Image (cartoon, rainbow, N blue to C red):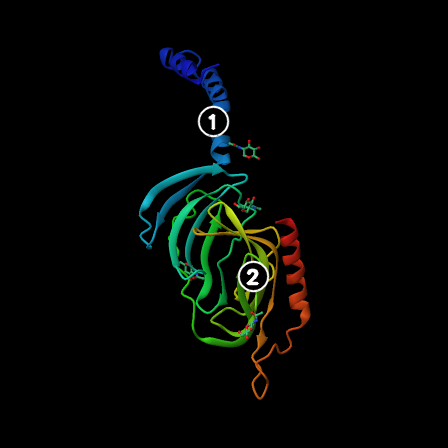
Amino acid sequence: MSAVRSFVQLQAQPRAAPSTRMVSFILCLLPALLATTNAQATILTCNTCFGLTETCNFGSGTCQDNKTTGGCLSVAEDIKLDGTQHTYFYKQCLSSYKSNIKVPISFTVGNDKYVRINTTQCNTDNCNAAVLGVPKGSTTENGLQCPTCFALNFAVCNSSVTPCTGDETYCIDFVGFLYKGSSPSPFQAKGCTTASPQVIKPGINLTSTPYIFSFFWGQSVLAEKIPTSGASPALGKFSFTLYLPGLTGLLLVKLLA
Ligand SMILES: *[C@@H]1O[C@H](CO)[C@@H](O)[C@H](O)[C@H]1NC(C)=O
Ligand SMILES: *[C@@H]1O[C@H](CO)[C@@H](O)[C@H](O)[C@H]1NC(C)=O
Ligand SMILES: *[C@@H]1O[C@H](CO)[C@@H](O)[C@H](O)[C@H]1NC(C)=O
Ligand SMILES: *[C@@H]1O[C@H](CO)[C@@H](O)[C@H](O)[C@H]1NC(C)=O
């Protein structure tokens, strides 16, 4: 049964039983209409671009994804871990919407070693149209402190307690694999972060342009206040409970590597 044929018939015989023909025309068209609606419901259209500045002017266009599993992504990131600063802006489709960190996140794991990612993830058509601002970071101390270190390839993560800045009010401690390209390096990192304990979960990936952080084990806890007077700059009330799971995780990573 073809909607086109029935339309042609309708045009050819305008006077003959219009109401019956109209009904059959609509009935004929209905499956086609429904099919179109279904296809639109399962396909998601997102904006794409990549850039070193907010103009995000390379590869401007759109991409399509399965609406059931995918999403749209917009990211502005500023990352410095190995002495090189990486600032990127991009918008793209996201094939697995569920396994990603969906909120802006920043952490500082040493002097001038940080990851700051502003992100929007959504799943309605073109919902990632806006270019985000790159998180500025802050040098203003907020009165909190965390053990801080960053170590690759099983080097000792020799942490020292460091003041936190800006809105980084949690301490993060995590181990996992850092992918640069396709080769994974085991890492351990500690420091101040904005990420609440709900965000950092084992098995979750944090994707950036230069790296993928694949969290094998991780936790964040509210940061401790910097002791006000006479106290030693030592670990304060940080207990071994903050360290032991990290060590266990690192051992497990070592076993699996
Ligand atoms: C989208 O994914 C769902 C669930 O995996 C699947 O049933 C559906 O066929 C997919 N749709 C398209 C258009 O690929
Ligand atoms: C993310 O980008 C938006 C839009 O520019 C901005 O309003 C927001 O403050 C940014 N968030 C962070 C954490 O930088
Ligand atoms: C850890 O760092 C402290 C000072 O930052 C240094 O004195 C100590 O030797 C280091 N320990 C190791 C095992 O690297
Ligand atoms: C995380 O990223 C790694 C490297 O690309 C990949 O092998 C792994 O499947 C990802 N995990 C999830 C949960 O997406």
Coordinates of residue 171 in the picture (x, y in percent)? 57, 68
Q: Residue at x 47, y 34 (%)?
A: 40
Q: Residue at x 34, y 53 (%)?
A: 52
Spot the residue most to the bottom: 230
- Asked if disc 2 is less than 8 Å from ligand 3, the answer is no
**SS of the residue at dot 2?**
loop
Residue 62 location, quadrant: top left
Numbered circle sitting on residue 155:
2
Coordinates of residue 230 in the picture (x, y in percent)? 58, 88
Closer-to-camera residue (64/225): 225
Closer-to-camera residue (12/42): 42
Q: Is residue 46 visible?
A: yes
| Ligand 2 quadrant in view | bottom left
Which residue, given by chain and number where applicable, does mark 1 sit on?
33
Kind of residue at disc 1: Leu
Q: Residue at x 56, y 85 (%)?
A: 228
Kind of residue at disc 2: Ala
Coordinates of residue 63 in the picture (x, y in percent)? 41, 39
**SS of the residue at dot 1?**
helix
